[in-house]
Image: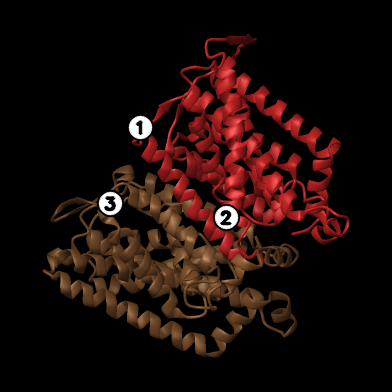
Chain colours: A red, B brown
Amino acid sequence: MAWIDFLDLVQSLMDGVMFGATYALIGIGFTLIFGVMHKINLSYAAASVGAAYLSLLIVSVAPSPVVYLMAAVCGGVLGALVYFVCFRFLPLNQSLATLMSTVGMLLVLEESIVHATAGMPQNYPAAFADTVFNIGPFILRGDLLFVFLLGCAVMVGLKFMLEKTRLGLATRAVAQQPIAAQICGMSVDQTNASTFVIAGFLGGTAGAMTGAAIGVLSPLLTLPLTVKGLVVTVIGGLGSIPGAILAGLIVGGAESLFQFVRGVSERDIYVMLMLFVFLVFRPNGLFAAPGGRD
Amino acid sequence: MDFYIGLLQVIGVHTLLGLSAWCVLHTGQVSLAQGGFFAIGAYVAGMLTAMVGWPLAWALPTAALFAGCIAIAIGFPALRVKGLMLVVATTAFAEIVRLVFFNLKWQVQTPNGMVGPDGGLGFGGIRYFPANALSGLEILSLIWSVVAAVMLFLWLLDRSRIGTLWRAVGEDEVAAQSAGINLTAAKVSAFGIGGAIAGLAGGIFSHNTTHIEHGNFTILLATFAIAYPIIGGLKSLLGTLVAVVFIQGVLIEGLRFLGDWRSLLFGAMILAVMLIRPSGVISAPLNLSLFIFKKNATKLGSSKGASHA
């Protein structure tokens, strides 16, 4: 391989890893909800993209950082909505019921987006799109770097929240032993609801970051984001937040690498094959969940 | 009239798809791979009739057998995991199948010109039905006799020893295993039979529409496949049929007068059905207690519902 090809390869790997921060955030959202409720929320990525769309409402009057903040807040609100519509009043011992209800929610969200925008892709404000750093032979795109750093900041915030606040303590307690947590006086329902809100914050940020990195928002983003988020969750290990972060970066990097080597139409085949390799050799993911429950 | 014949054809194909998911769900596994097997059946049957020139009577069973074999081959690694992991693994498989067909270019010269899958443009010219001058009604009766045969087969299977094994595994894996049931055999056989039925459905679908492309086989199709038995209720085969008629006939076609709002309402209706009848339309008595004793139901659920995703 020529030297210049090698440089391109490393370059695309770097870009991919930085974009992988969005996958990591979506993966964390899936993992958080799975951790406390042992349920899968298929509408999560759709709600994240929906939150980014909602933040477009103020795009003409507010600077882009406020738009991103708005996306996170809308994500939280949508998270609470999803919890109350799809989980709160369903019998949780019927695992298929919540699966179907979140699918219904996914369809509702996606169709609402299509309906509100007539299916047209919408421009999304980028941050530092013109900034470019040169590191040796490599180029560091400002907008991707911003997305990466924002993702890292949100993850640090989440870690702080989970480890230093009472809410985080309750979340971890419910995730480990719901009955024991209830005996100790924690409201499982409230903790579940607030976990959905927190996951929604992350999702909204991820939606905004995706929009900022790509430059447009489209309803076509929801299904690929859902699939990638699930892949990240499984590769990282169910219920494991560090696993989701690492897996998100790996999937982002691998995706970009496969795209460079095999082209855009084939890249996802190899990402999915990578998942199968993980399922065969490390079925529990990179990190097993704390407490080791399935 | 043609419209209703077309609608009944679609309902027939989707009933087969729902029945394929029913097999897998019966053993307690949630598989989103049915769309993948459907795609394999569609492409293989289409290639056999359009490119090789086989009659449909040979092509359909071959496609079903092929999809079933792939299902068994996939079943062994995939069924090592369960719950959410299986959902993701099968999703990944369905996406791989879709993307392989998205990239597949393989055309041969036939009397009707170049025929075969053409990458993203799809696979057109599967003209077995028009070439043999089959009318809509004849196609319709063909589809529904296949549906009837498959339903009879599954009904007999459900009443046989195999059906008992499947249900035992679906109810409680640990108990089934301690009773000496081979879990892998039960799950993989259900997966294989489900895959074969999905392949059959795909073969009929490709001949009925004459043009297929990768966009027909997204995760959404697989979601529909598992939605039918879940919404209909897993206890009976008839539930699947009722759910297909409800979704394809009432929700998708019956609400057409609503225009664009139809697809929005569609998701909301699925939500509503799951809220009112969480275990399916034909199964338990109406879940009215839900609205009265909400607290109790959730508390019980959150402590019990830890095993599956």
Which residue is labeled 3 in the image?
A: B123
Q: Quadrant of residue B253?
A: bottom left
Which residue is labeled 1 in the image?
A: A120
Q: Are marks 1 and 2 on the same chain?
A: yes
Q: Is residue A141 visible?
A: no
Q: Please name the residue shown 65% across and 54% down the image.
A: A279
Is residue A61 shown left or right of residue A248? left
Marks 2 and 3: which is nearer the front? 2
Is residue A285 shown left or right of residue A91? right
- Could you give the CA–CA distance between mark 1 and mark 3, rounded to whole angstroms? 28 Å
Q: Quadrant of residue B188?
A: bottom right
- In this rendered view, identify the residue nearer to me: B204 or A88: A88
State yes or no: discs 1 and 2 in contact (Cβ < 8 Å). no
Which residue is labeled 2 in the image?
A: A86
Amino acid marked by disc 3: Phe
| Percent coordinates x, y for residue A171 in the rendering | 78, 47
| Percent coordinates x, y for residue B193 in the rendering | 47, 74
Amino acid marked by disc 1: Met
Chain letter of disc 3 in the image: B
| Percent coordinates x, y for residue B245 in the rendering | 34, 70
Is residue B191 shown left or right of residue B238? right
Q: Secondary structure at mark 2?
A: helix
Question: Does A73 appear above or below A109?
Answer: above
